[in-house]
Image (cartoon, rainbow, N blue to C red):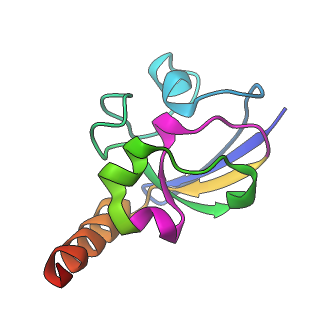
Amino acid sequence: MPKVILHVDGEVIEKEVKENANLVVLAGTKQFPKLKYGCGMGKCLKCACEVLAGWEQLGPPNWKEEKMLGESVNERIRLTCQLTIKEDIEISQDNILSKIKKEKNAVKLIK
């Protein structure tokens, strides 16, 4: 079973999950505590994370992630609601929204 390491609010949470699990679904059923999430459909940024390790094991970002994250998606920032966990992964939600806002503002200034 894949191991997920989550850095959130200064804590580190480590759990094994079933292969092909979605972390937001697990968080919604209280099986993955502390994960921040909102709509679960890729329409908000509450579940955004920075992938610290295991990036190469994930599928490519989908159109929802590209729309919501813009250029941030190329900086290893993803939406956990859109990820299927197949291998070990380490993610962080610490200060993630401020990183995305800075990136999105930078893109707006360029255009």
Location of residue 65 in the rendering, given as x and y in whole percent from the top left corner:
41, 48
Relative side of 103 to 86, left or right? left
Relative side of 71 to 54, left or right? left
Which residue sits furthest right?
A: 1
When asked about the image quadrant of residue 31, the answer is top right
Queried whether the magenta region covers residue 73, the answer comes back as yes
Q: Is residue 85 above or below residue 96?
A: above
State the residue at coordinates (40%, 66%): 72
Location of residue 8 in the rendering, given as x and y in whole percent from the top left corner:
47, 53
Which residue sits furthest bottom?
A: 110
State the residue at coordinates (19%, 83%): 110
Q: Is residue 48 above or below residue 42?
A: below
**Span colored in magenta:** 72-87
Q: Is residue 79 above or below residue 56?
A: above
Relative side of 101 to 21, left or right? left
Image quarter hosting the N terminus = top right
When asked about the image quadrant of residue 23, the answer is top right
Location of residue 59 in the rendering, given as x and y in whole percent from the top left corner:
66, 46
Which residue sits furthest top?
A: 29
State the residue at coordinates (57%, 30%): 32
State the residue at coordinates (43%, 61%): 94
- Between 51 and 43, which is closer to the camera in this rendering? 43
